[in-house]
Image (tube, grey):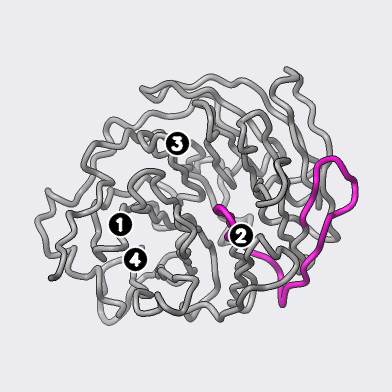
Protein backbone atom coordinates (compact mmCIF):
# COMPACT_ATOMS: atom_id res chain seq x y z
CA UNK A 1 0.00 0.00 0.00
CA UNK A 2 3.01 2.26 -0.30
CA UNK A 3 1.71 4.15 -3.31
CA UNK A 4 -1.45 5.57 -1.76
CA UNK A 5 -0.20 9.12 -1.75
CA UNK A 6 1.52 8.73 -5.11
CA UNK A 7 -1.42 10.18 -7.00
CA UNK A 8 -0.96 13.50 -5.23
CA UNK A 9 2.00 14.30 -7.46
CA UNK A 10 -0.17 14.15 -10.56
CA UNK A 11 -2.61 16.84 -9.41
CA UNK A 12 -1.86 20.37 -10.48
CA UNK A 13 1.35 21.67 -8.91
CA UNK A 14 -0.19 25.06 -8.18
CA UNK A 15 -2.84 23.38 -6.10
CA UNK A 16 -0.53 21.36 -3.87
CA UNK A 17 2.64 23.49 -3.74
CA UNK A 18 2.70 25.59 -0.59
CA UNK A 19 4.06 29.10 -0.05
CA UNK A 20 6.90 29.90 2.37
CA UNK A 21 7.08 33.63 1.60
CA UNK A 22 5.09 34.71 4.67
CA UNK A 23 7.09 32.57 7.12
CA UNK A 24 8.67 34.59 9.93
CA UNK A 25 11.98 33.75 11.67
CA UNK A 26 12.19 33.40 15.45
CA UNK A 27 14.19 36.23 17.03
CA UNK A 28 17.50 35.31 18.75
CA UNK A 29 17.36 31.54 18.07
CA UNK A 30 19.68 29.03 19.80
CA UNK A 31 23.43 29.02 19.11
CA UNK A 32 23.53 25.36 18.03
CA UNK A 33 21.30 22.74 16.42
CA UNK A 34 17.66 22.70 17.47
CA UNK A 35 16.49 19.33 18.76
CA UNK A 36 12.87 19.93 19.77
CA UNK A 37 9.98 22.42 19.62
CA UNK A 38 6.90 22.52 21.87
CA UNK A 39 4.06 25.04 22.05
CA UNK A 40 2.25 25.75 25.30
CA UNK A 41 -1.23 24.17 25.47
CA UNK A 42 -2.54 27.28 27.29
CA UNK A 43 -0.78 30.39 25.93
CA UNK A 44 1.17 31.73 22.97
CA UNK A 45 4.59 30.50 24.08
CA UNK A 46 7.11 28.23 22.36
CA UNK A 47 9.82 26.13 24.05
CA UNK A 48 12.94 25.39 22.00
CA UNK A 49 15.50 22.74 23.02
CA UNK A 50 19.01 22.90 21.62
CA UNK A 51 22.39 21.24 21.47
CA UNK A 52 23.76 24.43 23.04
CA UNK A 53 22.55 22.96 26.39
CA UNK A 54 19.65 25.37 26.81
CA UNK A 55 15.86 25.32 26.67
CA UNK A 56 14.50 28.75 25.68
CA UNK A 57 10.93 29.96 26.07
CA UNK A 58 9.62 32.59 23.65
CA UNK A 59 6.37 34.53 23.51
CA UNK A 60 4.86 34.32 20.02
CA UNK A 61 2.48 36.88 18.54
CA UNK A 62 -0.26 35.96 16.08
CA UNK A 63 1.73 37.41 13.17
CA UNK A 64 4.74 35.26 14.07
CA UNK A 65 6.71 37.86 16.02
CA UNK A 66 8.71 36.57 18.98
CA UNK A 67 10.40 37.66 22.17
CA UNK A 68 12.59 35.63 24.52
CA UNK A 69 10.99 35.27 27.96
CA UNK A 70 13.01 32.69 29.91
CA UNK A 71 15.61 29.94 29.57
CA UNK A 72 17.28 27.22 31.63
CA UNK A 73 20.50 25.28 31.22
CA UNK A 74 21.50 21.64 31.19
CA UNK A 75 25.03 20.23 31.51
CA UNK A 76 24.99 18.74 27.99
CA UNK A 77 22.89 18.98 24.79
CA UNK A 78 19.13 19.03 25.37
CA UNK A 79 17.26 16.50 23.22
CA UNK A 80 13.61 16.97 24.21
CA UNK A 81 11.23 19.46 25.83
CA UNK A 82 7.52 19.59 26.73
CA UNK A 83 4.94 21.74 28.56
CA UNK A 84 2.85 20.91 31.61
CA UNK A 85 -0.89 20.67 30.89
CA UNK A 86 -1.57 23.95 32.72
CA UNK A 87 1.14 25.78 30.77
CA UNK A 88 3.08 26.94 33.85
CA UNK A 89 6.10 24.63 33.57
CA UNK A 90 8.50 23.36 30.91
CA UNK A 91 10.54 20.16 31.19
CA UNK A 92 13.79 19.54 29.34
CA UNK A 93 15.83 16.33 29.07
CA UNK A 94 19.00 15.32 27.33
CA UNK A 95 22.54 14.06 27.18
CA UNK A 96 23.33 14.96 30.79
CA UNK A 97 21.09 11.98 31.76
CA UNK A 98 18.61 14.17 33.61
CA UNK A 99 15.32 16.00 33.20
CA UNK A 100 14.83 19.50 34.60
CA UNK A 101 11.69 21.58 35.12
CA UNK A 102 11.36 25.36 35.17
CA UNK A 103 8.40 27.01 36.90
CA UNK A 104 7.63 30.03 34.74
CA UNK A 105 5.56 31.60 37.49
CA UNK A 106 8.69 31.98 39.63
CA UNK A 107 10.27 34.41 37.13
CA UNK A 108 13.70 32.85 37.56
CA UNK A 109 15.92 31.24 34.91
CA UNK A 110 16.64 28.26 37.13
CA UNK A 111 15.32 24.72 36.82
CA UNK A 112 15.18 21.86 39.29
CA UNK A 113 16.19 18.31 38.46
CA UNK A 114 13.21 15.96 38.45
CA UNK A 115 14.50 12.79 36.76
CA UNK A 116 17.70 10.79 36.24
CA UNK A 117 18.78 7.87 34.05
CA UNK A 118 21.98 5.87 33.56
CA UNK A 119 22.29 7.12 29.96
CA UNK A 120 21.09 10.18 28.02
CA UNK A 121 17.34 10.84 28.03
CA UNK A 122 16.07 10.98 24.46
CA UNK A 123 12.43 11.95 25.06
CA UNK A 124 10.32 13.49 27.81
CA UNK A 125 6.57 14.19 28.07
CA UNK A 126 4.16 15.53 30.66
CA UNK A 127 0.99 13.52 31.20
CA UNK A 128 -1.82 13.09 33.70
CA UNK A 129 -2.77 9.70 35.06
CA UNK A 130 -6.49 8.98 34.95
CA UNK A 131 -6.68 8.56 38.75
CA UNK A 132 -4.53 11.52 39.84
CA UNK A 133 -4.86 15.25 39.33
CA UNK A 134 -1.16 15.95 39.61
CA UNK A 135 0.76 16.03 36.31
CA UNK A 136 3.63 13.55 36.00
CA UNK A 137 6.43 13.17 33.48
CA UNK A 138 7.62 10.14 31.54
CA UNK A 139 11.20 9.81 30.32
CA UNK A 140 12.67 7.43 27.74
CA UNK A 141 16.41 6.81 27.71
CA UNK A 142 19.22 5.12 25.86
CA UNK A 143 19.59 3.00 29.04
CA UNK A 144 16.61 1.01 27.62
CA UNK A 145 14.14 2.11 30.29
CA UNK A 146 11.05 4.28 30.46
CA UNK A 147 10.47 5.88 33.86
CA UNK A 148 7.51 7.70 35.39
CA UNK A 149 8.13 10.58 37.79
CA UNK A 150 5.84 12.23 40.32
CA UNK A 151 7.39 15.68 40.66
CA UNK A 152 6.94 15.57 44.44
CA UNK A 153 9.27 12.57 44.77
CA UNK A 154 12.94 12.08 43.92
CA UNK A 155 12.62 8.41 42.90
CA UNK A 156 10.63 7.16 39.90
CA UNK A 157 7.12 5.94 40.61
CA UNK A 158 7.64 3.08 38.15
CA UNK A 159 10.11 1.90 35.54
CA UNK A 160 9.51 -0.19 32.43
CA UNK A 161 12.32 -2.16 30.81
CA UNK A 162 12.37 -1.88 27.02
CA UNK A 163 14.00 -4.22 24.49
CA UNK A 164 16.44 -1.58 23.27
CA UNK A 165 17.42 2.11 23.51
CA UNK A 166 14.48 4.51 23.42
CA UNK A 167 14.66 6.74 20.32
CA UNK A 168 11.27 8.43 20.55
CA UNK A 169 8.05 8.46 22.55
CA UNK A 170 4.77 10.35 22.61
CA UNK A 171 1.71 10.62 24.88
CA UNK A 172 -1.89 11.50 24.17
CA UNK A 173 -4.66 10.98 26.73
CA UNK A 174 -4.14 7.40 28.01
CA UNK A 175 -1.89 6.33 25.13
CA UNK A 176 1.90 6.14 25.46
CA UNK A 177 3.85 4.95 22.39
CA UNK A 178 7.58 4.16 22.59
CA UNK A 179 9.87 3.60 19.62
CA UNK A 180 13.22 1.89 20.27
CA UNK A 181 16.25 0.67 18.39
CA UNK A 182 15.76 -2.57 16.44
CA UNK A 183 12.35 -1.22 15.33
CA UNK A 184 10.35 -2.23 18.40
CA UNK A 185 7.25 -0.17 19.11
CA UNK A 186 5.69 -0.53 22.56
CA UNK A 187 2.17 0.65 23.31
CA UNK A 188 1.21 1.38 26.93
CA UNK A 189 -2.27 2.09 28.29
CA UNK A 190 -1.60 4.62 31.06
CA UNK A 191 -4.36 3.03 33.14
CA UNK A 192 -1.76 0.25 33.55
CA UNK A 193 1.49 2.18 33.13
CA UNK A 194 3.91 -0.52 34.30
CA UNK A 195 3.20 -3.01 31.51
CA UNK A 196 3.08 -3.08 27.72
CA UNK A 197 -0.43 -3.16 26.30
CA UNK A 198 1.09 -4.49 23.10
CA UNK A 199 4.44 -4.64 21.31
CA UNK A 200 4.85 -4.63 17.55
CA UNK A 201 7.72 -4.52 15.13
CA UNK A 202 7.60 -1.28 13.19
CA UNK A 203 5.71 -1.68 9.89
CA UNK A 204 8.64 0.20 8.30
CA UNK A 205 11.75 -1.81 7.40
CA UNK A 206 14.31 0.74 8.65
CA UNK A 207 15.20 2.50 11.87
CA UNK A 208 12.41 4.37 13.66
CA UNK A 209 13.01 8.10 13.88
CA UNK A 210 9.77 9.41 15.35
CA UNK A 211 6.39 8.31 16.71
CA UNK A 212 3.47 10.71 17.13
CA UNK A 213 0.05 9.92 18.65
CA UNK A 214 -3.24 10.76 16.95
CA UNK A 215 -5.12 13.60 18.73
CA UNK A 216 -7.92 11.13 19.60
CA UNK A 217 -5.36 8.58 20.91
CA UNK A 218 -6.74 5.79 18.69
CA UNK A 219 -3.37 5.26 17.00
CA UNK A 220 -0.06 6.78 16.02
CA UNK A 221 2.18 7.68 13.11
CA UNK A 222 5.71 6.32 12.66
CA UNK A 223 8.49 7.91 10.62
CA UNK A 224 11.67 6.11 9.57
CA UNK A 225 15.11 7.04 8.26
CA UNK A 226 14.14 5.65 4.85
CA UNK A 227 11.63 8.26 3.69
CA UNK A 228 8.49 6.48 4.83
CA UNK A 229 5.63 7.14 7.21
CA UNK A 230 3.18 4.59 8.64
CA UNK A 231 -0.27 5.13 10.13
CA UNK A 232 -1.06 2.53 12.81
CA UNK A 233 -4.20 2.01 14.86
CA UNK A 234 -3.88 0.53 18.35
CA UNK A 235 -6.81 -1.89 18.26
CA UNK A 236 -6.93 -4.93 15.99
CA UNK A 237 -10.48 -4.08 14.88
CA UNK A 238 -9.04 -1.01 13.11
CA UNK A 239 -6.11 -2.86 11.52
CA UNK A 240 -7.64 -2.62 8.06
CA UNK A 241 -7.02 1.14 8.22
CA UNK A 242 -3.26 0.74 8.78
CA UNK A 243 -1.08 1.82 5.86
CA UNK A 244 2.30 3.28 5.00
CA UNK A 245 3.50 5.65 2.30
CA UNK A 246 6.69 7.05 0.81
CA UNK A 247 7.71 10.66 1.43
CA UNK A 248 10.83 12.83 1.57
CA UNK A 249 12.48 11.31 -1.48
CA UNK A 250 14.01 12.82 -4.59
CA UNK A 251 12.60 11.77 -7.97
CA UNK A 252 14.40 8.62 -9.22
CA UNK A 253 17.34 9.17 -11.58
CA UNK A 254 19.14 6.30 -13.36
CA UNK A 255 17.42 3.75 -11.12
CA UNK A 256 18.72 5.58 -8.06
CA UNK A 257 16.53 7.41 -5.52
CA UNK A 258 17.86 9.63 -2.75
CA UNK A 259 15.80 8.92 0.38
CA UNK A 260 15.78 11.08 3.49
CA UNK A 261 14.93 10.62 7.13
CA UNK A 262 11.49 11.61 8.39
CA UNK A 263 12.55 13.63 11.44
CA UNK A 264 9.26 14.98 12.73
CA UNK A 265 5.51 14.30 12.57
CA UNK A 266 3.03 16.77 14.10
CA UNK A 267 -0.77 16.50 14.21
CA UNK A 268 -3.01 19.51 13.70
CA UNK A 269 -4.90 20.08 16.99
CA UNK A 270 -8.28 20.69 15.35
CA UNK A 271 -8.34 18.88 12.02
CA UNK A 272 -6.40 15.70 12.88
CA UNK A 273 -4.39 16.09 9.67
CA UNK A 274 -0.63 15.91 10.09
CA UNK A 275 2.74 17.16 8.92
CA UNK A 276 5.89 15.28 8.05
CA UNK A 277 9.29 16.99 7.88
CA UNK A 278 12.59 15.52 6.81
CA UNK A 279 16.30 15.86 6.30
CA UNK A 280 15.58 16.79 2.67
CA UNK A 281 14.57 20.21 4.04
CA UNK A 282 10.88 19.99 3.13
CA UNK A 283 7.63 19.60 5.04
CA UNK A 284 4.25 18.37 3.84
CA UNK A 285 0.69 18.34 5.17
CA UNK A 286 -1.32 15.12 4.82
CA UNK A 287 -4.86 13.85 5.31
CA UNK A 288 -4.41 10.35 6.70
CA UNK A 289 -8.09 9.44 6.49
CA UNK A 290 -8.45 10.40 2.83
CA UNK A 291 -4.89 9.14 2.15
CA UNK A 292 -4.08 12.37 0.36
CA UNK A 293 -1.30 14.94 0.40
CA UNK A 294 -2.80 18.35 1.10
CA UNK A 295 0.27 20.54 0.55
CA UNK A 296 3.99 20.17 -0.14
CA UNK A 297 6.46 22.98 0.41
CA UNK A 298 9.70 24.02 -1.30
CA UNK A 299 13.01 23.19 0.37
CA UNK A 300 13.86 25.37 3.35
CA UNK A 301 17.62 25.26 2.74
CA UNK A 302 18.62 22.76 5.44
CA UNK A 303 17.39 19.69 7.29
CA UNK A 304 14.21 20.15 9.34
CA UNK A 305 14.94 18.73 12.78
CA UNK A 306 11.70 19.49 14.67
CA UNK A 307 8.14 20.79 14.11
CA UNK A 308 5.09 21.83 16.15
CA UNK A 309 1.61 23.31 15.71
CA UNK A 310 0.46 25.92 18.19
CA UNK A 311 -2.68 25.20 20.26
CA UNK A 312 -4.98 26.91 17.75
CA UNK A 313 -3.40 25.23 14.72
CA UNK A 314 -2.81 28.63 13.14
CA UNK A 315 0.99 28.60 13.42
CA UNK A 316 3.26 25.77 12.28
CA UNK A 317 6.79 26.10 13.65
CA UNK A 318 9.69 24.27 12.04
CA UNK A 319 13.39 24.21 12.93
CA UNK A 320 15.91 24.34 10.10
CA UNK A 321 19.17 23.13 11.60
CA UNK A 322 21.76 20.39 11.31
CA UNK A 323 20.41 17.03 12.49
CA UNK A 324 23.86 15.46 13.12
CA UNK A 325 23.07 12.59 10.75
CA UNK A 326 26.51 12.88 9.14
CA UNK A 327 28.59 13.53 12.25
CA UNK A 328 30.40 16.65 13.38
CA UNK A 329 32.41 17.16 10.18
CA UNK A 330 29.36 18.28 8.21
CA UNK A 331 28.24 20.83 10.80
CA UNK A 332 29.81 24.00 9.37
CA UNK A 333 29.24 27.59 10.58
CA UNK A 334 27.44 28.28 7.30
CA UNK A 335 24.73 25.69 8.00
CA UNK A 336 21.37 27.39 8.69
CA UNK A 337 20.15 27.36 12.30
CA UNK A 338 16.73 28.94 12.67
CA UNK A 339 13.13 28.43 13.75
CA UNK A 340 10.48 29.57 11.27
CA UNK A 341 6.80 30.37 11.95
CA UNK A 342 4.53 29.35 9.09
CA UNK A 343 1.03 30.94 9.14
CA UNK A 344 -1.37 28.08 8.45
CA UNK A 345 -3.88 29.12 5.81
CA UNK A 346 -7.55 28.22 6.14
CA UNK A 347 -7.33 25.47 3.53
CA UNK A 348 -3.79 24.18 4.07
CA UNK A 349 -4.55 21.63 6.80
CA UNK A 350 -8.27 21.08 6.34
CA UNK A 351 -9.15 17.45 5.62
CA UNK A 352 -10.76 16.63 2.33
CA UNK A 353 -14.55 16.38 2.44
CA UNK A 354 -15.41 12.76 3.16
CA UNK A 355 -17.52 10.88 0.66
CA UNK A 356 -19.74 8.57 2.65
CA UNK A 357 -20.50 5.22 1.00
CA UNK A 358 -24.08 4.14 1.34
Closer to us: mark 4 or mark 2?
A: 2
The residue that disc 1 covers is 286
The verdict on residue 26 being magenta is no
Question: Residue visible at 43% across and 29% down?
Answer: 25
Q: How far apart are marks 4 and 2 (CA)?
A: 21 Å
Percent position of residue 81, x then y: 64, 43
Q: Name the residue under label 2.
A: 169
Q: Which of marks 2 and 3 is nearer the N terminus?
A: 2
Compared to residue 300, the image places residue 356 above or below, namely below
Classify the position of the C terminus by image quarter. bottom left
Q: Do the residues labelled 3 and 4 touch (CB within 8 Å)?
A: no
Name the residue carrying label 3.
310
Above or below: residue 179 compared with residue 351: below
Q: Which is more N-terminal, label 1 or label 4? A: 4
Q: Which residue is drawn at 56% across and 61% down?
A: 325
Q: Who's the residue at 31% across and 77% down the image?
A: 2
Mark closer to the chain start, 3 or 4: 4
Lower sequence index among marks 4 and 2: 2
Marks 1 and 3: in contact by CB < 8 Å? Answer: no
Q: Could you say where residue 302 lies in the image, as x and y percent from the top left?
A: 43, 48
- Percent coordinates x, y for residue 12 in the rendering: 9, 56
Q: What element carries label 1?
A: strand
Please tell me whether mark 3 sits on a helix, a strand or a loop: loop
List the residue tagged with mark 4.
247
Marks 3/1: CA distance? 17 Å
Q: Nearer the viewer, residue 216 or 169?
A: 216
> Residue 260 lies in what quarter of the image?
bottom left
- Image coordinates of residue 295 in percent, x first then y, are 24, 51
Q: How would you rate the neighbour count of disc 1 (Cα within 10 Å): few for under 14, some for 14-19, many for 20 or more?
A: many
- Distance from the alpha carbon under mark 4 to that under mark 1: 11 Å
At numbered mark 2, what does the secondary structure look like: helix, strand or loop?
strand
Amino acid sequence: MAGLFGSAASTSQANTLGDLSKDVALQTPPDDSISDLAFSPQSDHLAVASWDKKVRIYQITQNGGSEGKAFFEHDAPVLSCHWSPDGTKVVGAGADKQAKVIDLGANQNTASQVAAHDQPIRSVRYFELPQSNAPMIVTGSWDKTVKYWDLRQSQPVASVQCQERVYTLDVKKNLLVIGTADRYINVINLNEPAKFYKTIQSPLKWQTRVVSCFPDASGFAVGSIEGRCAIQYVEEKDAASNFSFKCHRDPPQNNMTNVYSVNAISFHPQHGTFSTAGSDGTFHFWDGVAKHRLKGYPTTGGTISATAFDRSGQIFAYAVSYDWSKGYATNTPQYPNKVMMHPVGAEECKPRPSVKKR
